Every structure is written in structure tokens, then in C-alpha cells.
Amino acid sequence: MFHKILIANRGEIAVRIIRACRQMGIKSVAVFSEADRESLHAMLADEALCIGPARSDKSYLDIERILSAAEASGADAIHPGFGFLSENASFAKYCNECNIKFIGPSSDIISRMGDKSAARETMKNAGIPVTPGGKGVLREADEALLEAGRIGYPVMIKAALGGGGKGMRISRSDEDFTENFMNARREALNGFSDDSMYIEKYIENPRHIEIQILADEHGNVIHLGERDCSLQRRHQKVLEESPCIAIDADLRERIGEAAVKAAKACGYVNAGTIEFLLDKDKNFYFMEMNTRIQVEHPVTEMVTGIDIVKEQIRIAAGMPLRFKQQDVKITGHAIECRINAENPEKNFMPSPGRITNLHIPGGNGIRVDAHIYNGYKVPSNYDSMLLKLIVHGDDRQEAIAKMRSALGEIVIEGPDTNIDFEYDIINNEAYQNGDIDTGFIERFMQL
């Protein structure tokens, strides 16, 4: 087992990993930017090192600074969390070259599965259903326009190396295609330093389903059921739950087997997520693979009782999985709300500033993953997420009731937040009836 792990991240995920390390008897090292000098993760870790100014490209995205911090602290492993360098193949490669274990898949797998066009081909060759799409990477609008006509509208334009909703546009005709393609390509270049694009058929109002997988270095691969991540705004998730009420036992087995098959097809090792689109006829299509821990992993932990972060660490240390597929049981229902410092009434404008009053709800079946505290100053430099509120109930109705109660109790004064927005979703009749898909938030905001 590792002696000391450096967490190459910030915010609630850094706190989450530090706590897992502490429970496993592993020392933790936090890195922080000058803007995060008063952050909770820097105070909780056994050691903390400043790695640069507030700008993420000079701190959390600076591979050389992070590796220098790891070597200076004597860390023998690095956990990247999510975002920042978590899916950076070069970072994983340099960790390996420095004899520091990267807690995640190999650089080769990150590179292969991070390229959405290459990932699609890998899945097609493995017999995994994929959405009808283009034949490869596209960079020129004229060539892409011809490909869109071949596939048939509507189409989704995507950055080949993208993620987090960046570099994505929906086009419904030749008339709007070129503008959408150019805008998506420009956004991809700015966000990922790469303007490779690809096109696939856009499936109207599907459910966005994720399958959590765990794979060790000994060839064992299991899945931990599904998460319904359909509630999204501009391709950014707002609320997630597990299990998906539209999936019965037979479909769960089939889609889970497809996810395991997908992981084996690319030789995957560690925790990962296979993402599918589920249409109204219960057909599912591979969308992409995330080669890291997901923001919404707690809902899976709540319904399975499996600590995914601890399993990541054990797998990276060369240990075999402690569970077989038949050991995984889905119990009850879990919901997660992302609470952000933003103002929904002002087009979700970020709202940094100092927290002047804070009350966190508690009780049976209520979990809060947070990095904030009373008096904490929310910086303007990073993602606006303040905490994740997760509840678990015996069934979906009880989980909704618990989330309603918890959202009604939580107090965050100072910055604006989206608490009321989440509360309104939970109280929406269509949501309560399970009538949700990826177009739900857009419809909900028009009410």
C-alpha cells in the first residue's frame, strides 16, 4: 500500500480523497494555489504545498509544479480527482516516468478513450452499440457539412478531445451547421488546445445513463449499476440519481454487461464510467468513457455501500478487486444535488464572495461532500460548486422527501446559490413522476 498520496486537485473532491486516505492510514499531501491558501483541503491534509498563483494554468494545470511538489514531499502516488489533469495522458505518463503511481488508468488508455472518435471505433469493434456518426476526425466545415448530410439531421457536433459540455453544438439543418461547427471548433481550441471535431446523430430527448465500472490489474472487471444523469443545463449536470427508474432488471443486466465488455475491450484498469444514451424505446448507445472518478460517484456509493475512492487506491496499489459481480447489490435510491455559487435568475452568473452564515443539514441517509466553512471566501477563479448534497432512501419517493427536507434546511449566506432552483426541481410534478430526459431542464426553465 502507498505511504503518501498527493492530491492534484482542490475543493470538495480533494477533501473527499484526503478523508479516504486518512481512513486507510495513508498520509496525504495537498497542493493549493495562492487563491486557495485558506481552503479546507489545504488545512485537512497532513502536508500542504503552494504550487503557484490563482490562474489554474500556473498551478493546478502545471504538470511540472505538481510533480515537483510530489517529489519534494516524498509522495509515492498521485490522485488527480476530476477535472484539471485527471484525463491528461501526458500527466499520467510523466508520473510513471517519475516513479510516482498515477491513481487511474494508463496514459495510453486515457489518450485512446479521451479521443471520442477513436473511442467510438474501439466500441464498434467490440460490438457495443454506438450512435450513428461520422467516419473520423473533422477539421474543415465544408467536409463536416457533407458528413452531416450523410448522417442526417439533427446532428451533434463534438470536440474529439472534449468534455464537460465544451465544444458541443446541436445542428438541425444545413443553414445553421457551419456557424455551429465553427463555434464548437473555436471553443474546443480554446478549451483543449485541439480543434479536432467529430459528428454523430443527435438522439432527441434521451436519458443520459452512466455505468460505473471498477477494473483491477488482474483482469477482473465489474460494474456498480447505473446513474441517471439526464438533468443537465448546457451539458452540465444539475442533479443525478441511482438507480434509473426507467431501467428494469433485464435492461440493467444488458447495459451493465455492455459496460464491462467496453472496459475489457480497451484493457481498462481502475475506476471509470461508460456513458450511454437511452432512447424512448429502451435502446442504448455508447456515448463516451470517462477515465476518472465522477462528480456524481456518491449516489453509486450510497446504493452499493462501496467506497469508490478507496477502491481506486487499492487497485492502483496492485490489489485485486474485493468484489465479484454477484456481490454487488443495489439497495434503495440515492439523489445528488450540486449546490453552486451562482444566480439562476441572472443566467446562472457565478457568485464568488465570503460565506457569512452556514448551516449544513444532517440526519439518517443524508451526506454532504463539501469544502466550504463559515467565513470561507469563495474564489472567482474556479468552478462554482460549493458542495454536493446526497440523500439515500428506501425508495425514490423517500429519497425525494429527504432531499426536499435537506434543501429546505441548508443555509448558505453571502454568495448567491442555486439551492432554490434545485428545490423547485425536486418539487416539480414531472420530476417526481420520473418523466425526465436531457431536455427536462430546458422545459422546466420555460415554465
Image (tube, grey):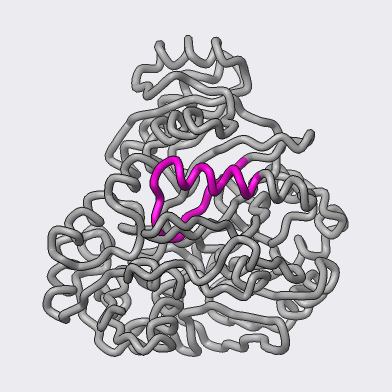
Q: Quadrant of residue 59?
A: bottom left
- Horizontal side of 104 relative to 234 (left or right) equals left
- For the image, the number of numbered tags is 0
Q: Nearer the viewer, residue 67 or 345?
A: 67
Residue 392: x percent and y percent?
Answer: 72, 75
Residue 53 sits above or below residue 28 on the image: above
Query: Is 271 one of the magenta-colored residues?
Result: yes
Residue 56: x percent and y percent?
Answer: 28, 61
Q: Quadrant of residue 383?
A: bottom left
Q: Is residue 383 visible?
A: yes
Residue 8 sits above or below residue 118 on the image: below
Q: Is residue 337 visible?
A: no
Quarter of the figure with the N terminus: bottom left
Q: Nearer the viewer, residue 380 or 106?
A: 106
* Residue at x 35% of width, y 55% of height: 105
Q: Nearer the viewer, residue 324 or 130?
A: 324
Query: Is 195 one of the magenta-colored residues?
Result: no
* Residue at x 55% of width, y 57% of height: 222
Residue 304: x percent and y percent?
Answer: 64, 70
* Residue at x 50% of width, y 69% of height: 308
Residue 28 sits above or below residue 341 on the image: below
Please give the range of residues in magenta: 255-276
- Horizontal side of 5 relative to 165 (left or right) equals left
- Horizontal side of 151 relative to 102 (left or right) equals right
Residue 291: x percent and y percent?
Answer: 41, 52
